[in-house]
Image (tube, rainbow, N blue to C red):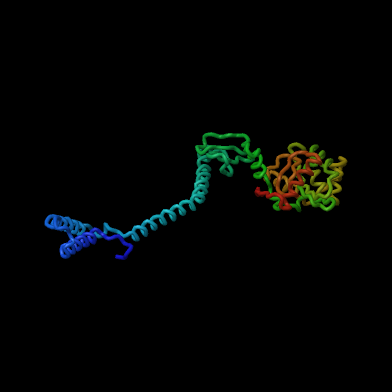
Amino acid sequence: MTMNDQPTWGVRAVRAVLSIRAIKVTGATRPLCRPLCTPIFTMICASLLATAMALPWGAQPSNAATISETNAAAKDEVNTGATVMSTVGATAALETSVTTSALAGLLQSLYPSTRFGAINATPWPGVFEVAMGSNLAYVDQSGQYFLFGHLYDMKSQRDITAERKDLLTRIDFDTLPLLDAIREVRGDGSLVLAIFSDPDCPYCQKLESDLRSLTDVTIYTFLMPLVSLHPAAHSKAVSIWCAKDRIAAWQATMWRGESIPQSDCPHPVDRNVALGERLGINGTPTLISVDGRMLPGAASKDQIEAWLQRSNIGAQGGTTSEVVPQ
């Protein structure tokens, strides 16, 4: 026992007995009290001593041991809390992954005749985005309730559905077989686009008329005749490809409506038609920017320039564009 430790009941009892004996020997007690007080105190101290000796020693922990045990318990609680917090993010991500995977199987079992694409979580709790071809829908976890339409974030004033559709329909421009296209470079050719076009399509002719004044651009024209609409377009497309000067033959056909001599040679026309169908292009003209965005229809020169500038900014690092290979 150190000087700072509190004495136990046994020690206190022994000290009391010794003190009483010392008093009896020295005669320090008052004469009137000696015959009565000494036996009483002796009995009390003996009782305390017996009680103290009967108590288990483990029931009298020192202050140092108590503090040590308390600190250890607190440390265990802190470590446990830290472990729980560190696993929250991983657990949430795993639950989302498991949920989307389970939902995919559920939807396929509920609607076996429908082909479902990717399923993703949305900012709307409990609602998931599901791709069905080129369309997007929203479904709950039960697979019973579907929402067809646009999902808006009113706080940030964003059309989430339109953004997702734009992303999902993007094409990896680098995978396009550019050798199967007519390549025309104007000016420095800094703006790049590809066009799927039909030589007998009136909207394609209008587009080519508007593009005549477009400068500093590289255009890859994929000849894609839609024979269901224009039966003579296939042979005309082959003749343009087989011409000695493909760009001159294309411009004569589209700009001035001239007829060119019919010819035949190994050509990519059929491959282009199959490529367009694989990319989901079901109409002409359809433009593809270098960052994979698609622009169907005959847009004006100003619209096309603004549309191309968006991809130019993205290429310089101003924006980040995710490319989804088709």
Q: Nearer the viewer, residue 31 or 141?
A: 31
Q: Nearer the viewer, residue 199 or 2?
A: 2
* Most distant residue in the front direction: 31
In the rendered image, which quarter is residue 42 located in?
A: bottom left
Which quadrant is home to the N terminus? bottom left
Residue 77 vs residue 140: left or right? Answer: left
Residue 148: % across, % down: 60, 34
Q: Residue at x 74, y 49 (%)?
A: 313
Residue 282 vs residue 204: left or right? Answer: left
Q: Nearer the viewer, residue 100 or 325?
A: 100
Asked whether residue 234 is in view, the answer is no
Residue 91 vs residue 166: left or right? Answer: left
Residue 51: % across, % down: 19, 56
Q: Residue at x 83, y 45 (%)?
A: 214
| Whether residue 125 is situated above or below residue 24 in the rendered picture | above
Q: Nearer the viewer, residue 71 or 266?
A: 71
* Most distant residue in the left direction: 35
Residue 87: % across, % down: 48, 52
Asked whether residue 320 is in view, the answer is yes
Q: How many marks?
A: 0
Residue 109: % across, % down: 50, 40
| Whether residue 177 is situated above or below residue 201 in the rendered picture | below
